[in-house]
Image (tube, rainbow, N blue to C red):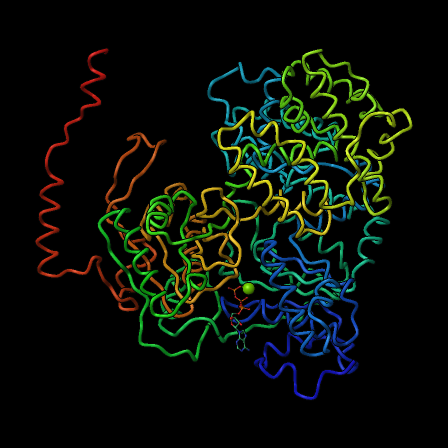
Amino acid sequence: PQPSDTDPLATLNPAQREAVEYGIGAAREAETAPLLVIAGAGSGKTNTLAHRVAHLVAHGADPRRILMLTFSRRAAAEMTRRVSRLLSRRLGLRADAAESCLDWAGTFHAIGARLLREHAERIGLAPTFTIHDREDSADLLNLVRHELGLSAKAKRFPTKGTCLAIYSRAVNTTDDLDVVLKTAFPWCLEWEAELKQMFGAYVEAKQKQAILDYDDLLLWWAQMMEVPELAAEVAARFDHVLVDEYQDTNRLQAAILLALRPDGRGLTVVGDDAQSIYSFRAATVRNILDFPAQFAQAARVVTLDRNYRSTRPILDAANGVIGLAAERFTKNLWTERESTARPRLVTVYDEAEQARFVASAVLERREAGTPLKRQAVLFRSSSHSAALEVELTRRNIPFVKFGGLKFLEAAHVKDLLGVLRWADNPRNRLAGFRVMQLLAGIGPATAGKVLDAMEASATPWLAFDCYEPPAAAAGEWEALAALMRALRGARADAGGATTSQASASVGAGPAEQGVATPAVPAGWPAEVELIRRWYTPFLERRFDDALVREADLLQLESIAATYRSRERFLTELTLDPPEATSDESGVPLRDEDYLILSTIHSAKGQEWEAVSLLNAVDGCLPSDMATSSAAEIEEERRLLYVAMTRAKDALALVIPQRFHVTGQTPGGDRHVFAARTRFIPAALLPLFEQASWPPPSPLSHEAAAMAREAAKRPVIDLGAKLRGRWG
Ligand code: ATP
Ligand code: MG
């Protein structure tokens, strides 16, 4: 098909156009080397990628054979939406039709999970494998440690979180354990032997229970691509592979890409080395720097230097910050968006004042016509927004916090998902434990016995059905057994469409016919409703606020309906959960206007008209945790650069003069006096407008003085007095 009469690429600048058209069309077929777009923030990399996909399809590429690897599920959805819009404009396709063809857009992890399920049988993996999130992984690791008797050994043994971080790093860097310990966890070196033993047992436990953790999704995928015939099969499914945010990929991801496109043909990657912020997860900026020379044919490299996002003063300030980096980033971004408003450095008294300032500023902007959705508040770590969340709630300002997990962490939601996961994978012990122990009269010992029997059997569900429950639990046991049968029935019904053949094969056999089985639902997502109905009595028994929680579960049902299948739902929910919100129940808000709160990491690739950054002070940015090496400090600088370059029209960096430090440090909980982040030294100050809040006025001076006076009065610690009576 031909592009419509007006030039569909007319809005692009020459460099963007070059990247979009590279290798496409009869005249350019000789261009077969891979393509790298390396360019600064807001220069249109993601936009160019979307145009390129649309251009490919407009020139006859099959959208079902285009793989788009993005940084988050949100980014994947956004990419699909943009491409579909472009396509509907160019080809007159219906946008939803185009969207449903662009099925292969997602994160490396989500795409890996799909490919692994499809090829599971060939690689000795149960197709119904369960994916563990980090919390579940840490719990399993902990369990293994107890079973090995390592917990009794010493108090100073690394925590389960540290153990997981070490394991994860070893997997993602493909380095040996001793190298990982020496470079990143030197204080754990003395435990090398124990850790090795523990990781061995952990890997074994995962395989026995058909569990993959996040890292396994990449590891298994990469391993699969090392088998030549499988690699050829997987690679042959795609004609084009496009990757956004390439600077934040790790070695495994680079290896996967290389195996997908060994000669680089049909491969496009875009990224910005100045925005590399994931080295703590073993991402390596070497991937993007080494990309051009990785293939037999050197990659075509396109750089973009015009920024379309930010006004000149914001861009100047961001360029100033990154210009002081130890590394030389050779990008000179310019913009035509003139403005007289410099980014603001706003000094406030403390974090409470910071929260009040941000809330007021947000409301002022809304008054002036910028809806909440086009504003964002960013911070270095998730805990930094606590005071602000309280303030926003107090003022009735709705917000959504990216990367929050509240909703999925709730016990009732976990219960329901546990049933779904267990039905999928009967060897999943964490889920099995969770579900069986809901029943009155079933404790961990019984549940463990049943799970052992299931694990030992080739037909686990038959073993489950054969179990004679204690008399007290008989009624509820029967209801659970019937539910599990119905869920299996639903899977069996779906036939070839599901990958749950293993459980289906031991499913509704003739022996089970006589028992009252709930009507087999029509398929996804009706099974969620089935589980919810079964779960209702437990809800009432377990919680005082059963009604609120029931509403959550209804909401979960409607979220489930937005996923194409159970596999996709469970996979993507684990990998990329919906956002936590200001709503009490934690249920994602729809359609309403709300403010975005986000860590800088989760804000990657996005933009808002107005952005405020909390805690632009030393200790927060750079973080206290990062002051050990120069490389870490540099990564913190890039984080600030990423934060600043999210803003289109207005940017405020807030500097609370005092902030609260919790735990760990020798001083325990305390207030510390803070200084402006070292990444904005005096030399850069002219690029900013400095202000303090509340703005000084004679009256408020007086009020402030009074407040300071009041604050000086000695605190009478009644608590200590009362405790003293017993000490
Ligand atoms: P980041 O590094 O933050 O991921 P990016 O390089 O991916 O940024 P985009 O998000 O693609 O940049 O684009 C930034 C903004 O510039 C978007 O609002 C986009 O619509 C706009 N933009 C990009 N190219 C053009 C263009 N040629 N004309 C007008 N606007 C453009
Ligand atoms: Mg981008």
Q: Residue 532 sits in which quadrant? A: top right
Residue 410: % across, % down = 53, 35
Residue 272: % across, % down = 54, 63
Q: Residue 518 sits in which quadrant? A: top right
Tell me if residue 457 comes above or below residue 633 in the rendering: above
In this view, which residue lies farthest toward the right?
A: 510
Tell me if residue 659 comes above or below residue 329 in the rendering: above
Tell me if residue 155 comes above or below residue 74 in the rendering: above
Tell me if residue 500 comes above or below residue 633 in the rendering: above
* Image-based side of 213 in relation to 624, left or right: right
| Front position in the image: 566 or 548 | 548
Going 77% across and 37% down the picture, which residue do you hit?
A: 128
* Quarter of the figure that contains the N terminus: bottom right
Residue 67: % across, % down = 72, 60
* Image-based side of 220 in relation to 634, left or right: right
Going 24% across and 56% down the picture, which residue do you hit?
A: 347
* Quarter of the figure that contains the C terminus: top left
| Front position in the image: 427 or 524 | 524
In this view, which residue lies farthest toward the bottom?
A: 5
Going 40% across and 68% down the picture, which residue do you hit?
A: 370
| Front position in the image: 473 or 565 | 473
Residue 610: % across, % down = 39, 64
* Image-based side of 44 in relation to 227, left or right: left
Count of numbered tags:
0
| Front position in the image: 2 or 680 | 2
